[in-house]
Image (tube, grey):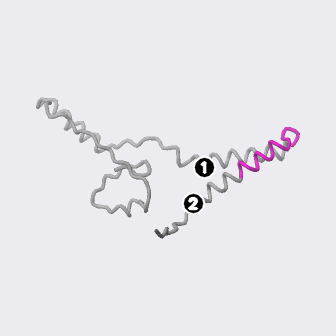
Amino acid sequence: LIFNGQVLRDDSSSLRSFGIFDKCVVHCLIHQGPSQQQSSHSSSNSQQQSMNNNNTQHRDLDLSSYFIPILGIALSCLWYFAVAYTAYFNFLSTTALIGLTSLYFLTVYGTHFHVNVAVRT
């Protein structure tokens, strides 16, 4: 099972402990294990490699958690330039900057202050 970009490997934990909530998306990845036609020499090498791989797990570089802060810094820089260099910002560009900033704050509010509302059917 994959939730929020993380593979859920611990079978003894509950789904709630992983942060899974009602109506969220969980992906299921099905794959075949190693083939059974390997010779004893290659199986001993693969066992040795799997022991080395278990000791050092590699995690993919996940930059998605940095997107909102980077966007906030970029908007802050744009606001600085809008105030410092007013000659380069006309009414349309200032209005667009206000709109983008409003969307940014709505996104931050929506992602960090999520309220679960029970839907009665």
Viewer-side residue, 63 vs 107: 107
Question: Hey, what amino acid is under mark 2?
Answer: His
3D distance between C-alphas at marks 1 and 2: 11 Å
Task: Read off the magenta span.
Answer: 86-101
Viewer-side residue, 120 vs 84: 120
In which quadrant of the rendered view does residue 56 lie? top left
Q: Looking at the image, is 18 positioned above or below residue 40?
A: below
Mark before the other along the chain sequence, 1 or 2 = 1
In the picture of the structure, the residue carrying the numbered disc 1 is 68
Q: Looking at the image, is 11 positioned above or below residue 85?
A: below
What residue is shown at x 49% (from left), y 69% (from top)?
Answer: 118
Question: Regarding mark 2 in the picture, which secondary structure is present there?
Answer: helix
Badge 1 vs badge 2, beta-carbon distance below 8 Å: no
Give residue 77's position: percent from left, percent from top. 73, 45
What residue is shown at x 19% (from left), y 32% (from top)?
Answer: 45
Magenta segment includes 96 = yes
For label 2, the crowd category at 10 Å Cα-Cα, with few meaning under 14, some 14 to 19 and many 20 or more, is few
- Which label number is shown at residue 112? 2
Viewer-side residue, 45 vs 25: 25
114 horizontally vs 75: left or right: left
What residue is shown at x 60% (from left), y 49% (from top)?
Answer: 68
Question: Hey, what amino acid is under mark 1?
Answer: Ile
Give residue 120's position: percent from left, percent from top. 48, 70
77 horizontally vs 90: left or right: left
- Which label number is shown at residue 84? none
Magenta segment includes 67 = no
- State the residue lying farthest toward the left: 40
* Main secondary-structure element of the magenta-colored stretch: helix
Question: Regarding mark 1 in the picture, which secondary structure is present there?
Answer: helix
